[in-house]
Image (cartoon, rainbow, N blue to C red):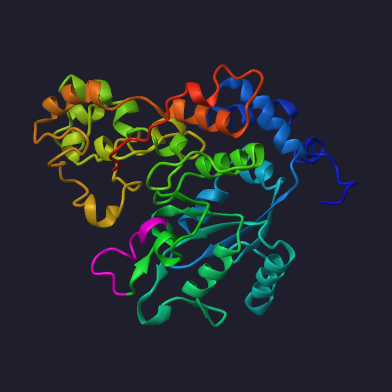
Amino acid sequence: MPTDAPSLEARLAARGISRRQFLKFCGVLTATLALPEFYAPKIAHALETAPRLPVVWLEFQDCAGNTESFLRASAPSVAEIVLEQISLEYHETIMAPAGHAAEKSLEQALEKYPGQYVVIVEGSIPTKEDGIYCVIGGQTAMSIADRVCRGALATIAVGACAWDGGWPGASPNPTGAVGVKSAVPGLKNLVNMPGCPMNVVNLTAALVHFLTFKELPALDQEGRPLFAYGQLIHNNCERRGHFDAGRFVETWGDESHRLGYCLYKMGCKGPQTYSNCPAVGWNDGTSWPIGAGHGCVGCMSPHFWDNTVPVYQRLPNIEGFGVEATADQVGLAALGVVAAGVAVHGVASAVRAKNSPQAPHDASEVNVQAPTKKG
């Protein structure tokens, strides 16, 4: 940015966003990252002072759902705040140039910011027949992803398709669609943010973490940020009390459904899916699928199009509990089995990144262990 550019505060004010709204936004992101509240001013300072981060957004075999999620945040919007501190150099869906002019923008970004940009990948990457099932500007998605991702500071795979192939990669997978990890093997600094689509709150939090601590957030063994994918939905579900009490919806639209009973018997995949959906919600926290009366479909889980169907069929076995049991038995087992550790992971990540004089622990005092099984 030019040295005489207006401050972030001035630019936000020009968009009608007050200082109070900005600090509230930083507080929300602090909570999303599972950090202590005293990190909020640190995040605010980082957003106000960090150089703009060049971002390249690639789309391959996708429905543009993650782009839609990114654009659907509102007052003060993710775009209004985070885009003030990132420079979206290339995004074929929302950029003004088209055709060869658009591809020129990509090449200019790669030349101008070698090894300094973050690439966000949306959509799966076909590998059969040398990748001919997705060609952009005469280049296959395989070749584009390999070149752009290997030259990036970090890569963020957003959505189920970019994570493990998603719907295009579901059986029988005629195009050989895979996620970024398989298409660009050995890639360093890769963050997976599955979902159909991913939640824009989590993407924003990951970018803010990078701007604040100059490193990626702590990840689980699947490469997913622990702050967003470190807890079973079942643990924090607003219907969990009904599950433990044995109160279940038996038929769509019945009295138990109207009373908000547990959706486990209707096929809800919350007991095997790791996500912070209950905490952050969707559409700016307005609601989320289970809150709206529909069971979780497990879209944050590996190969969910193959592994969590039929959508409305009750889970035969709940991974992590090790039982073929009734819902009541599973509920009793669940009470003491899955530990609530995401806050610890978030604190450990921040402390490990930047020791703060106010921090209550140092890295050696925090036990950081990712869950051994993930859904």
- Percent across and percent down for residue 276 are 41, 35
Q: How many marks?
A: 0
Q: Residue 170, relative to residue 16: is it above or below?
A: below
Q: Nearer the viewer, residue 167 or 179?
A: 179
Residue 12 image offset from top left, x and y in percent: 76, 38
Horizontally, is 129 left or right of 326 in the view?
Answer: right
Horizontal side, residue 212 vs residue 271: left or right: right
Q: Position of residue 100 (x, y in %)?
A: 66, 79
The residue sitting at 51% across, 65% down in the picture is 59
Vertical placement of 169 versus 134: above or below? Answer: above
Q: Position of residue 53 (x, y in %)?
A: 69, 50
Provide the major secondary structure of the magenta segment: loop
* Quadrant in which the C terminus appears: top left
Q: Is 170 inside the magenta-drawn segment?
A: yes
Q: In the figure, residue 88 lies in which quadrant?
A: bottom right
- Residue sitting at the far front: 364
Left or right, 88 with respect to 120, comes to right
Q: Nearer the viewer, residue 202 or 374?
A: 374
Magenta stretch in the rendered image: 163-174
Q: Residue furthest right?
A: 4
Query: Which residue is at 64% across, 46% downward?
Result: 79
Q: Is residue 295 visible?
A: no
* Nearest to the observer: residue 239 or residue 204: 204
Residue 301 appears in the rendering: yes
Q: Per the image, is 175 magenta?
A: no
